[in-house]
Image: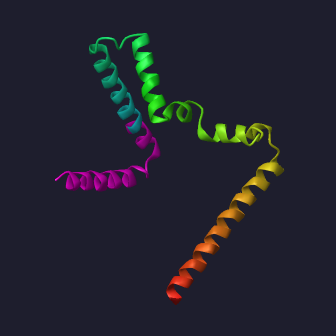
Amino acid sequence: MPKKLFTFFDRLEDKIRIKLSHWPITYALIGAIGIILLWKGVWDVADRVPGLQGFGAIGAGVLILLLTGLLVSFFIGDSVILSGLRRDKKLVDKTDKEILAAEKAGTAEILAKLDHLEQDVRNLKAD
């Protein structure tokens, strides 16, 4: 039963997402309302739980975000961390030539991987 329920909602979500993708502003507004209502519900529940006010709420939130690995990735972002480790310039500081070169390198890498996959498929068909 749980698998059927999951499959039903998964397919329903796909259909709704596909239809709403044709109207991005409506999609964004519905998403915004959903997010706000979710946070309102969380806020209301937290107000009823003893110890989840002020510093207790901050501590619980930070702990949850740290344990799930979302604190840094959500507030800073993976690309910012990776660019710092690689000592890349910020996008605003890069010249047009640097941006174009990076895009060409990325495209070349993707094409090489696709060629490799295409060759693997040919080999599998030959076997």
Type of secondary structure dominating the magenta stretch: helix
Q: Residue at x 49, y 35 (%)?
A: 69
Say if 8 sits above or below 58 in the image: below
**The one of 60 and 101 positioned closer to us in this rendering:** 60
Q: Position of residue 12 (x, y in %)?
A: 28, 53
Q: How is the image coloured?
A: rainbow
In x, y percent, where is residue 93?
80, 37
Q: Quadrant of residue 123?
A: bottom right
Relative to 113, does residue 43 appear above or below in the rendering?
A: above
Indicate yes or no whether the magenta region holds residue 18. Answer: yes
Vertical placement of 48 versus 3: above or below? above
Range drawn in magenta: 1-30
Query: What x and y, as percent, mark residue 19?
Result: 37, 53
Q: How many marks?
A: 0
From what the image shows, is residue 120 above or below residue 63?
below
Q: Quadrant of residue 7?
A: bottom left
**Magenta-drawn stretch contains 95:** no
Left or right, 12 with respect to 28, comes to left
Q: Quadrant of residue 4?
A: bottom left
Q: Residue furthest bottom?
A: 126
Please identify the residue farthest to the left as the structure is shown. Answer: 1
Closer to us: 93 or 86 = 86
Q: Is residue 108 left or right of residue 53?
A: right
What residue appears at the point 48 percent right and 29 percent down from the top-left corner? 66
The image shows residue 37 at horizontal and vertical percentages of 33, 28
